[in-house]
Image: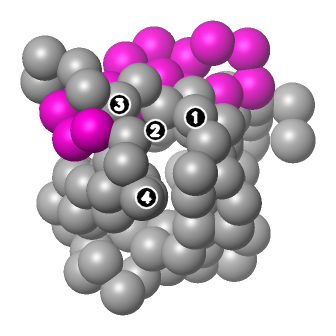
Amino acid sequence: MDTFCAMEGDTLVLNILGTPNASKDAIGKPLGAELRVSVTAVPVAGRATDHMVRFLAAKFGVGVHDITVVFGRFSIHKQMRIRAPKRLPAVVAKSLVRANPGAS
């Protein structure tokens, strides 16, 4: 993947650079082939990743069960698969349009 996100059928694949123990939960800007995502949870026993999944589920309009952590549960470098997202944050939508300019 040349960018931080790509669609595979109805599933969004998202590469994430996580920041745990942040002052607020937020989706940031891309950094290379990863999207910065900050969460307030502490990085203990996967709690920050679990919190990130709940945060992203709300942002993408899906249930927690629709998000799979492919790798990086205990790392700041993660890949997640989001099945059939109902909403796309602006930074993700913009990247997908750039990656597929002919698709609408």
Please check the rendered image and state whether residue 41 is part of the magenta-colored stretch, yes or no: yes
Query: Magenta part of the protein: which range?
Result: 25-42
- Element class at badge 3: loop
Q: CA distance from mark 3 to mark 4?
A: 10 Å
Residue most extreme to the left: 24
- Element class at badge 4: loop
Question: Quick one: label 1 or label 4, which is nearer the N terminus?
Answer: 4
Q: Is residue 41 positioned above or below 74 on the image?
A: above
Can the viewer see residue 68 in this picture?
Answer: yes
- Nearer to us of marks 1 and 4 is 4
Residue 43 point in image, percent of width and height:
38, 41
Task: Name the residue located 46 percent from the left edge and 38 percent from the top edge.
Answer: 93
Q: CA distance from mark 1 to mark 4?
A: 11 Å
Q: Disc 3 designates what residue? A: 20
- Nearer to us of marks 3 and 2 is 3
Local crowd at mark 1 within 10 Å, few (<14), some, or many (≥20)?
some
For the residues labelled 3 and 2, say whether their Cβ atoms are less than 8 Å apart.
no
Mark on residue 76?
1
Task: Name the residue located 13 percent from the left edge and 17 percent from the top edge.
Answer: 23
Q: CA distance from mark 3 to mark 2?
A: 24 Å
> What's the residue type where badge 3 is placed?
Pro
Task: Name the residue located 65 percent from the left edge and 52 percent from the top edge.
Answer: 72
Q: Disc 2 designates what residue? A: 93
Residue most extreme to the right: 1
